[in-house]
Image (tube, helix red, strand yellow):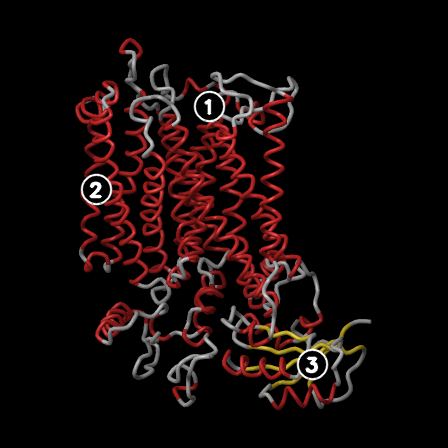
Amino acid sequence: MRYFTPSTRPAPPRYDLLAKHEEEEIERAHQENIREPYVTHNRDAVWVGDRIASVIENPTPLWWYIAVAIAGGVASLTGLGILYLITTGVGVWGENKSANWAWDITNFVFWIGIGHAGTMIAAILYLTRQKWASGINRAAEAMTVFAVMCAGIYPGVHIGRVWFAWFLAPIPNGNAIWPNFRSPLLWDVFAVSTYLSVSIMFWYVGLIPDAAAMRDRIKNKILKYFYAILCLGWRGSARQWVNYEFCYLMLAGIATLLVITTCTVVSSDFSTSVVPGWHGTIFLPYFGVGAIYGGFCMLITLLVPLRELYKLRDIITLRHIDMCCRFVLLMALLISYIYLMEFFVAYVGGSPNERFTFYQDRIFGPYATTWYCMILFNSVIPMLFWSKKIRRNPWLAFGIVIFPSIGMWLERFVIIVSSVHRDFLPSSWGMFYPTYVDVLTFTGTLGVFFLMYLLFIRFLPMIAIAEVRSVLPEASPHAPPTVINNGTEPGGHHV
Amino acid sequence: MSETSPLVCPVGSGPMPGKLYAVGAEFANPKELYAAAEKVRDRGYRWWDCYTPYYIHGLDKAMGLPKSWVGLFTFAGGLIGLTGGFLLITVTSVYVYPHDTQGKPYFSLPAFVPILDLLMIILSAIMSIVGMATLCMLPRLHHPLWEWDAFTRATHDKFFIVIEADDPNFNEKSVIDLLREIGGTNLTLIGDEE
């Protein structure tokens, strides 16, 4: 493999000139017909560590406090909404006898889906040796953890009498009742709790060497103790690295299996029922694709401001944004195929109820607007990403992915509400309208998510320092001649 | 770690007070470290280690390290989760609390698969981390190397080789000569409390 090495080593450019230099660097990589560098501008390992750690070491910027205040204020809506729900009863939500499941499960699936892209990047791209992912995997995993936490709020509170939530756990209770292990709802409990635990473990293991790096450099006494405890006494010895890397590999494999299991189980909540619009085998890939789609959109939404605010454009490069946009495009195509396939299967399946759901209720029924918006946002607008110019324009990409982010929420609403509100018996048909408690509780979860994310970027290295360093050309003991000592030493590869 | 610890002294600046733990040397980049590690390995040392800020591809081969055993822990965890989960589900669903759900048999294995799978996953993940921590000898509250000021850069930009006094071949003079010969700088004697 050829490494991208600049013909000359210019002094690092000033940051206001960076955008221009970045384009030149990429342009030259294309002319020389080699891969773009993982870290642009020939930055070295020391720069990478300093730049990422500076986010934590520098004084907290004012915008951070403002953002935390806003996110915290919004997050309190969830707290108040849940308090009102528990003290009053599930009647404060808009659910009724026709639409037993509505807004809460929509939000649950929306958040759990966002989580899946983080695991996809951190685990699947790691297993497939996509080294570029090392620049964004920490940020993506953090997104997973916080999104799954937001998702977990809903199954926790939607059961009505929340003080009996522990009946879901496989422990004997006062009536000697054990949970029904054949129920998809119990699978869901296991899937979400396992997913949350394993995501945190995977994220934490990735953090260990970086916590040690922070321990060794931070001046603040309290934070030093914090990182010293977090890193468990990591020394970075080669014997530790061998076991560590193997553990990370194992966890990546486990997380890959888990992400498939979790979206399968979440889809089984629906597909194991007989409700028209839910009862389809396509639900398993449907939820997987949808999850990764929504997650990549959220990731672009997070990465674009972060790379600008913290001047990380050399690490989170245009190539990263481009790659994420390509994933968005791929998932948009897959999900459009699934939308078409649902209609096709409803047609050839021959069930009149299923045909009614798709050919009349979805496209002409009372919720038809959500369906048309969904198609516009998820299948039409992301087609802009066929253009490389758009994919390489971060703020434009940031603007575009807001639509599929909303579209993915609408998709869950379409699947859930517009299937269940008119099922087999016309006498039990009805409508679902969200109450203000529904709306505010969901708005609050956005605040919870962003609040936790803001705390994460402030106190933990948001990019995996050790991993980014290890993909630099200089990290290879067999680096080509231009990399070490300005090309005075011969390079080569081990046999 | 700001003031110099009494347990650390650069080579040549006087005798080591107390018990000697190891001799350490600094290297500038992965390439030098890699070449040096091969030489230390070839001299037959066993109680020694390289310290790097990031994982260096192939360094374990240069050091002659065997493959990691973490996979065994993962497998054991998976097995525990699978068998434990199978017992939990079967015993409760068939014997302790048999429950007729939509006429499904009490022992309905296909419906048990998702939870078996999830329990297998979580136990193997936990055991992987337990295995990693055990094999890395973590968590660790103190280590003699942390007395060495220069060693804080082992997580930043420097690379170290440390040969421990516990090695059967250890001889202070020959170890110092070897570390000098293979290009180490900032050679330091590191002591340990009795």
What type is the residue that disc 2 sits on? Ser
In the picture, measured across the screen, residue A127 lies left or right of residue A219, that is left
Separation (CA) of disc 1 from disc 2: 36 Å
Q: Residues within 10 Å of mark 1 (few under 14, many from 20)?
A: many
Distance CA(mark 3)–CA(mark 2): 63 Å
As shown in the figure, which amino acid type bears the numbered disc 1? Leu
Query: Could you give the CA–CA distance between mark 1 and mark 3, rounded to whole angstroms?
Result: 65 Å
Q: Residue at x 43, y 88 (%)?
A: A489
Above or below, A362 against A321 in this view is above
Q: Is residue B71 left or right of residue A446?
A: right
Q: Which residue is mark 3?
A: B23
Which chain is mark 2 on? A
The local crowd at label 2, few if under 14, some if 14 to 19, many if 20 or more residues have their Cα within 10 Å, is: many
Position of A250 relative to A235 (above/below):
above
Same chain letter for marks 1 and 2: yes
Image disc number at residue A379: 2
Chain on which label 3 sits: B
Q: Secondary structure at mark 1?
A: helix
